[in-house]
Each structure stands twice: as structure tokens, then as C-alpha cells.
Image: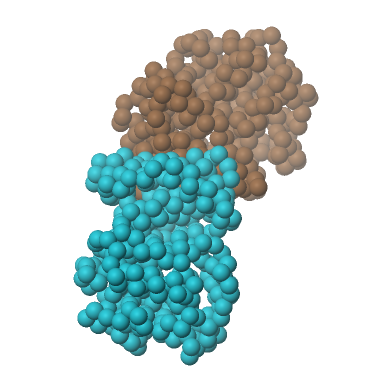
Chain colours: A brown, B cyan
Amino acid sequence: MNLTHPIIGIIGAGAVGCYYGGRLAQHGKNVHLLLRREFDRVSQNGLHVKSADGDFDLYPPALRVYHRAGDMPRCDLVIVTLKTTANEFYQPLITPLLKDDTVILTLQNGLGNEDQLAQLFGADRTLGGMAFVCINRLADGTILHSDHGLIKIGEYRGPITPRLRQIAELFNSSGLKCLAIDDLLRGRWEKLIWNIPFNGLGALLGLTTDKLVNNAHGLALVRNIMEDVLRIAASCGIIFPPEIIDEKINQTLSMGSYKTSSQVDMEHFRPIEICAIFGNAMVMGRSHGVVTPYLTMLYNQLGLVRRATLT
Amino acid sequence: MNLTHPIIGIIGAGAVGCYYGGRLAQHGKNVHLLLRREFDRVSQNGLHVKSADGDFDLYPPALRVYHRAGDMPRCDLVIVTLKTTANEFYQPLITPLLKDDTVILTLQNGLGNEDQLAQLFGADRTLGGMAFVCINRLADGTILHSDHGLIKIGEYRGPITPRLRQIAELFNSSGLKCLAIDDLLRGRWEKLIWNIPFNGLGALLGLTTDKLVNNAHGLALVRNIMEDVLRIAASCGIIFPPEIIDEKINQTLSMGSYKTSSQVDMEHFRPIEICAIFGNAMVMGRSHGVVTPYLTMLYNQLGLVRRATLT
């Protein structure tokens, strides 16, 4: 396993994968991007990133893009940025990239991704991380990185390891702030405290984040949902101080008008990450006997609207 | 007070007022309709009703329509079918129609209308009623009465009186099924059990009633909200058997695809009856210490979306 000069495969290069992959490539890392919808555009016109941390453009062959996983090299590090609605493709997309000691890092949203990866490819090589970042793809294909950007990464099971520090250093040496953490699951829940209300209400009601925190109705909804999430996390032994709700709301106020990926998905009639972001948390709460009316209502509303747009 | 051959004023002739007023006029009753948005159209082209109980058309002068309450005659019976968002106009619209013994019957949605009327004009002359009916106005102004139609009316305070029976007979002799009931408030809550989930979710999610009962997500939402409403009613001493939830859902299944007035309002960026249908019930529950997360979330979501469409 070479994590000093690793061959890095990025699986599922949506907005997040393109941004992180692009930054790594920009800083001379050996990056290979698997693209699907955007393959033609990026392979012909390059990757264009407008970023709060500095714009950049990358063109083939400096940027190595692929349309089929089978055409990619075996990697030392596979970073998974698929939408979780495509997790059923883990096996065909990741298997061709694996060596015996390849490490797999998922930066996907929500709960359950590491579990699925561990089951398919082994717990020992599974890592997870959360990207606390505002990234969208614009209509012309440009990636817009509008705010934040901290990545927190952790071992699937257990505290920080040397390899985890090496991967954090890969990001940090590429202009991407990355923190190795001892408790991945706590990080997952911390991100969900934000994602569940803002992705959920944003998608359901077609509202950017600012519209959810600049009035009493929105704040009541966000708070109620966050309280449900905190109770589920607590039932898993992960206790957050109640002040985290105000912290998350204050961070959101500072973000301006942001459209979550789920709102973008809803607008384009694409699948929303209902299971990973909402459903798995709700089921977890239910299995621990936690009553979560606000999350449950949000989950059912998203399911209902999703169904209605498909039929 | 002449309730055998009464002069009847209909205040706020939207779809419901036009339908009931039209039926009464069709059967020879002395009906005077106050119209606002539709005055020009109806006074020029008449009133056209497509009804599950038989179509009919009425033209001036057989149909007496007014644009100003001050032009209307003093009435024996005033039927109020205003949208509750216009209740602030009770005084200027109703006062010109009143004699000493005029009876006022509100067929409006939700809670609090009789209280407001009683406060302004006296509890003794206040009656209330619920129209369990599917009525919409089509784009060309035609009134579409698609299903049901039972009216239940009651005294503001107390059991059935002779005058209440006379008014019920007015409706019944005009092809409109009307039942005098002993407990108006119970009737109000019975209607809210349906209106709160179906008007609320329909408006919020842009879904007709059929889309809310033909799948598990929708049914879970409807049931959860109905359970909240039943708990508030119970805290007011009005107990419904739990089976009423299945009854209401089965009635809805038989209605086909119906668009509630609140959904229509939302589509046209018109005010939704948030206070009368949702807010007053929620506040009532809160004042009795009842926890109603689903109703509260629905209320906040409607308030949020309403706010977002206005700003």
C-alpha cells in the first residue's frame, strides 16, 4: 500500500468528487476520475471549478477521466463519492480498482455506506469521511464551491491510525483541510444533524437553506427535526450537547443561500438519498424505541412526493 | 324572523356559496348572493353548476347577485361562506344585512368562526355548520360539485332548536341534504379530522386526495396527523372512536381525485386558511398541554411555504 504517492481512484465524480478529485490533481496527485453523466463534457472541455479557495481549471491528459471502471488502473486509495442511491453499483464499480491492500474511503452522505463497503470488500480497508462543504454543479458543468470545505475522516472501526493520518495529509497538502478523527460514527451523526433538516426540508419545500433559518416557522421545523436526530444519536451512545443545534443554525446563517444536493435532485426529478440520509437514521431510532415524529413525517413526506413525481 | 319564506343572504359566494346559494335559488328560495371576484362574470353570464346531483344554470334576474353588501336587502338568514382569511370583513359585510332577529349561519371551515360572529353580532343569533362536500370552481367559472354534499348544522351553544330544524328543512327542500345536530363543536372537530391532513398535505405537497391515500407514506402521514387532531379534540372533551380514522380514509378512497380548497389556494398563490383549519386547533391543543408534533410540523411547513411564496 503506497499512501505517500498513491494512485487515487475517484468513483462517482459528481460535484463533490470533481471538486476533491480536481484539487488533488491540481496539486500533482495521481488522480483517476470515473464520470458517468459528465464524462463527455469533462473529457472534451475539461473541469472548471469556481471556488471560495481559488478557481482552477484542469484539462485532459493532466486530468485523467474514465467512463468505465474497467478502464481504470488498480488504485492505492479509492475515494467513493457516488450518490448513495447508486450504492447497488459498489461491486462492479469498485472491484476493478482493487489491489489486495487498496484502502476505500467513502465521502458519501448519511448512514450505512461504510457498513455496505465493509461487507463487500472487508472492514479492514474501509474508511469513511464527511465533507462539510457547499458544492454544486452549475448548468454549464462548472463546479461551484461556495463555502466551507473541511473533511473529517475516520477508520470504519476504531481510532486514528497512521494510514488515516497519511490520507489526511494527502488532502491537506492539496489545499483541502482534512482532519483525522477518532470516532467516525460521531462524525456521521454530526453531519446528519445538519443534513436531515436542511436536505429534507429544502428538497420537500423547494427552499434554499437561508429560507429555512430566517423565520420562526423554519427555525421551529429545523430545531424539532434536529432534536429528533439528537435523540437517535443518543440512543446509539453518541451524545451531543444541546447547544450544537444553535451552532449548526449559526453556521447555516453564515452560509447565505445554499441549495442542498437533495433540493437539486428534487428539482431535476432525480432520486433523493432518502435511505442514507433519512431512512437509516429513522430505522435506527425505531429499533432503539426512540420516538421521532418530525423525522418520521419528513421521511414519509419525501417518500410520498418522490412517489408522486414518479407516477 | 321568517324562516318559512326567508330572505337569504349569502356572504362570500366562492365555490361553496355559489353551489348552496344556487341550489336554494333553483328551488325557489329568495336568495341574494354577494360576489367579489366573480361578480362581473356571474352577473353577465349567469351561474353554471355541474353537479353529481344534477346540473343547473341560473341567470339574472332570477339569480340576484351583488357586488356591495350595502346594496343587499335586510335578510332573515345570512349564510356566511367567506374564506376565513377574510373574517376581518365580517362587520362591514354582514352588518348591512341584519334585522333585529336575523339569524347568521357560518358554513366556513375550521375553528373560531362562530366565536367571532357571536362576539360581533350576538351568540343568540349565531349558528354554524359543516359542508361535507367536494366543490371546486373551474377555470371558466363553472362550479363543479363532484361528490358528497351533506350539511350538518348546529346552534352555537346548545342542542337542536325549532329554528335550526326550519333551516335544515330549507336545505332539504332544495335538494341539499342537511342534518340538524345537537353538538356543533363535535361536528367541527369531525370535519377537522379530515380537513387538517387533506387540506394541509394537499396544499403543501401539491397532491390531490387520492395521492394521499393510495400509498403507505401518504397513509402514515394522514393517520399520524389525524391522531394528533383526535387527541386535541379529546382534550376538549370531544371523544371520537379510533375507528373514525379508517372511516375517513375509506370515504376519501371513494372520492376519487379531489383537490381541496387549500391546494387550489396554494396553486393560485392565494392565502390558505391556516388559522381556522390548522392554527386554532394547534393552539387549542397547546393550551391543554397536548403534544401534537405532526400537526405542529404541518402548520410550520405551511407557514414557511406561505411566507416563501410572498417574499
Question: B28 or B234: nearer the eye?
Answer: B28
Q: Going by the image, does A75 lie left or right of B146?
A: right
Q: Quadrant of the N terminus of chain B?
A: bottom left
Residue lying at 60% horizontally and 30% vertically, measured from the top left = A84
Q: Identify whether A40 is placed above or below A172.
A: below
Residue lying at 58% horizontally and 42% vertically, measured from the top left = B215
Q: Quadrant of the C terminus of chain B?
A: bottom left
- Asked if one can make out residue B111 in the rendered structure from this viewpoint, the answer is no
Q: Going by the image, does B44 lie left or right of B156?
A: right
Tell me residue A2's x, y (percent): 64, 11
Q: Going by the image, does A78 lie left or right of B58?
A: right
Question: A43 or B51: nearer the eye?
Answer: B51
Tell me residue A7's x, y (percent): 67, 18
Tell me residue A13's x, y (percent): 65, 32
Q: Going by the image, does B116 lie left or right of A134?
A: left
Residue lying at 65% horizontally and 14% vertically, measured from the top left = A121
Residue lying at 46% horizontally and 67% vertically, measured from the top left = B177
Q: Residue furthest right?
A: A71
Tell me residue B164's x, y (percent): 32, 69
Q: How many marks?
A: 0
Q: Identify whether A221 is placed above or below A165.
A: below
Q: Quadrant of residue B9?
A: bottom left
- Asked if one can make out residue B176 in the rendered structure from this viewpoint, the answer is yes
Q: Quadrant of residue A122?
A: top right
